[in-house]
Image: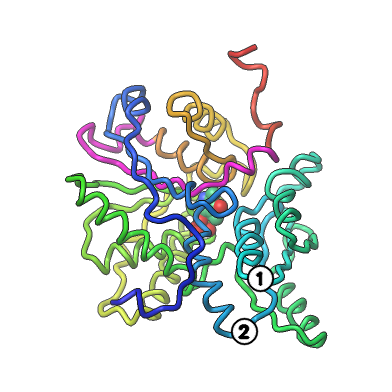
Amino acid sequence: MDLSLFPRIQLGHFPTPLEPMANLTALLGGPRLWIKRDDCTGLSSGGNKTRKLEYLMAEAIAVRADVVITQGATQSNHARQTAAAAAKVGMKCHILLEDRTGSTDPDYTDNGNVLLNRLHGATVERRAGGTNMQQEMEQVAARMKSDGLRPYVIPGGGSNPVGALGYVGAAIELVSQAAARGLKVDHLVHATGSAGTQAGLVAGLQAVGSDIRLLGIGTRAPKEKQETMVYDLACRTAEHLRMPGRIRREAVEANCDYVGSGYGMPTPGMQEAVEMLARTEGLLLDPVYSGKGMAGLIDLIRKGHFKTTDDVVFLHTGGSVALFGYGEAFDLKGPQA
Ligand SMILES: *Cc1c(COP(=O)(O)O)cnc(C)c1O
């Protein structure tokens, strides 16, 4: 497997740092906790979509597109990073936002990522929750083509075999970074949504023969559905890479016990995790993904899922911009009042 054979443009700051979380480790009584800072990719406040967009935008350029179309939930971090990437390469960006939460809080509907989409010059259309968003994008693309434009459609979350290459690269980056500091990583934990991050990591870890155990914490679908999505995309990514050998189904593990009432809906565990990380490590998680991912990690630690001698890396996938759309979810009259 040779990742350098695939077209890629530079959009982010890599490698992202791998840092110890000594205070959180002490607070929770072990295992040793580390954080891989993919919230620090640099592009428009960062996040995991930057790695995917380095490959997706390279393909958009290769097919001589002049506009990219993508979709996501109202507070989509993917939409915001796509808008920034398009601005950087001089393409137009058109975003379809799906109302997946029903929130009418003006901060949710217009602040956070939505504000940044506009700042980056993207055009935005809204759709009701439950709309077939892929089909909507294709209709918009057809309309643009008849207007003489050359649209390139990026699926939600940038999750296809091209975008997932970004996380094949991230797996390789983490393995060599850990080796360089003499760290043996036992577990890697992160929030999983549209599946591209986990699928790329599964393929990448397998490609380098790593025995790191990977666990996705679900943010939308039930376990069965989430694992099937990840496994399917990991297999297609491995094919795209012409990787010998099949992806092992057992390498795909998702825990979907921390979704709460649905995608983008706050949970007490998420609120605790966001506040805990902000107050012990000075780190900003997000309410939709990394907050729920960390809530899962904290709960599993409390339940004794890990050995206290394990080294556990949490992949911070970014998203803190969405906090400004979710002020209502946090008790601002807390201990500081
Ligand atoms: C998109 C996103 C995820 C989930 O990544 P997928 O590749 O969609 O599974 C996790 N965290 C943040 C902050 C995200 O924006």
In the rendered image, which quarter is residue 298 located in? top left
Query: Which numbered disc covers residue 234?
Result: none
Residue at 76%, 39% in the rendered image: 107
Residue for badge 2: 64
- SS for callout 2: loop
Label 2, label 1: how far apart the Cα atoms are:
12 Å
Quadrant (top left/top right/bottom left/bottom right) for the N terminus: bottom left
**How many residues crowd around disc 1 within 10 Å: few (fewer than 14), some, or many (20 or more)?**
few
Residue tagged 1: 90
The magenta-colored residue range is 300-325
Answer few, some or many: residues within 10 Å of disc 2's Cα (few below 14, many 20 plus, some between 14 and 19).
Answer: few
Q: Disc 2 or 1, which lies upstream in sequence?
A: 2
Q: Which percent across, then down, holds residue 76?
A: 64, 54
Q: What residue type is labelled 1?
A: Gly
What residue is at 45 percent from the left and 45 percent from the top? Answer: 316
Q: Quadrant of the C terminus?
A: top right
Q: Relative to the observer, which residue lies in front, 100 or 311?
A: 311
Residues under numbered marks 2 and 1 in contact, where contact means CB atoms less than 8 Å apart: no
Callout 1 secondary element: loop
Where is residue 302? Give x, y as percent: 36, 29
Q: Which amino acid does label 2 sit on?
A: Arg
Magenta-colored stretch includes residue 241: no
